[in-house]
Image (spheres, rainbow, N blue to C red):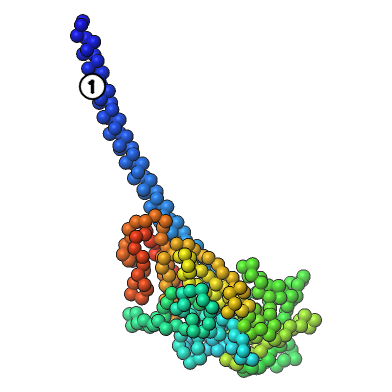
Amino acid sequence: MKNSLPSRTAFTLVELLIGMIITAILGGVAVSALWFIFGTFNQTYDYVSARQEIEFVAQKIGREMTHVGLGMPNNRQGRGSFAQSFKDVWDVAYPPMAYMGEEGEPWGGPITIGLNNSEDVYDKAGMVTTLVTDRSGRLIYHGPELYYAWGVATGVRVKLPDRVPAGHRKSGDEVLFDVLDYDNDMTGLDFLQRFKYDNKNMGISVNDGRNPASWILLPTTRVPMLVTDVDEGSKTMKVVLAPGAPRMGGPITGIDEVVFPMAARLFRGANDELVQIVFGSDFTDPSTNKRNVLAHNIVGLHFAYDPELRIVTMYIAAKGEESGLHNSPPDEWPDDIAPPLPAGSRIVVNRVNWRIRN
C-alpha cells in the first residue's frame, strides 16, 4: 500500500502531459484553420470589392453607350463630318462635340480617343487622337481617355408648319418647327425648357453655340440644329443648320422626337479614381461641368476603338486593398498597346465592349 500513491501520481502526470500535447496539437490545427479561413476571406473580399468597382462602371456607362451617336452624323466615311456639323453659324463658340474630330480627318466622331489623361482645361489639342495601331490587319485608335457624345430623347415631337414647304435644306438655313404638346398639362416647349436628365438641367438655351443645350437633334435627319428662338405663344422653335451640317431633306410630320446631345469624358484621375466629366454650358470652364467619380482603386484604364467594326472597348484594372501577387500581366490587359500594370497588388482586369449602333 505504500507504493500506490506515488504510482497514481506518476500516472496522473503522464495523463496531464498527454492531454497538454493533444490540446496543443488540436489548438495548432484550429489556429491554422482559422488563419486559412481568414486569409481566404480576405482574398475573396479583395477580389469581390475590386470586381464591384468595375461592374458599377460598366452599368453606369452602358446606358449612355447605348445612345452614343443618336441623331448625329457618325463620321463613318472618315471625313470629320461629326465635328463639322456642330460648328455654329457665327463661327465663334463651339460645343465640345465640335472638337471631337477635324475636317477631312478619319479620326473622331461620337467616339473619340484622347491622350490627355489629366484634368487640364479641355481644348482641341488635348482631344486629338494620335495613337493608331494595326491589330491583326485592322487599324484601331487607342489611348487612356475617352470622349463620347450621346443623345437623350425627350418625348417631345415637332413638325414643319403647314405654311413651310417640305424640301431639302442646306447648311445655314433657318427652319421653323411647330412643337407639339407634351401632355394635357404642359406644352412641348415648356417641357423642353424644364427638361432634366440625371438631375441635370438640360433646358433649352437659345443662341449659345458653346452650350450643348442650345442644340437639338432629330433621329431621322442626323443633322445638328442650333436653337435661335423659341415662342411659347405660337408654340414654335426656330433653328439653324450649322455650316458643316449635311443637307436635311424630306417631310417632318410630327413623328420626329427632339433629342438633346450630351458629351462626356472618361479618364483615370488623381488618387486612382475613374473620373467622368459631363460637359456643361461652357466645357472649357470646369465649374460648369459635372465631375463624377465612378470608381476608386483603378490602376489601369485604356480604350480602343475599331472604326470598321464600330466597337469601343474599355480595359479597366482595379486593385484590392491587400497586397499580394497577381498574374503578370492579367490575361485581359492589352499589354501590346497599354502601359504595364503596377506590381505588388491583387488586380482584377475586365474588358467591356460596346457596339456603336447609331
Q: In this view, does 193 lie to the left or right of 152?
A: right
Q: What residue type is labelled 1?
A: Val
Which part of the image, by quadrant, shows the N terminus?
top left
The single residue placed furthest to the top in the displayed view is 1
Q: Is residue 191 left or right of residue 243?
A: right
The residue located at (36%, 48%) in the rendering is 39
Q: How many residues crowd around disc 1 within 10 Å: few (fewer than 14), some, or many (20 or more)?
A: few
Q: Is mark 1 on a helix, strand or loop?
A: helix
Q: Name the residue under label 1.
A: 14
Residue in the foreground of this view, choosing between 32 and 176: 32
**Which x, y percent locates residue 346?**
37, 59
Q: In this view, does 182 lie above or below 101?
A: above
Q: Which quadrant of the structure image shows residue 131?
A: bottom left
The residue located at (41%, 60%) in the rendering is 319
The residue located at (62%, 89%) in the rendering is 92
Q: In this view, does 312 lie to the left or right of 332?
A: right
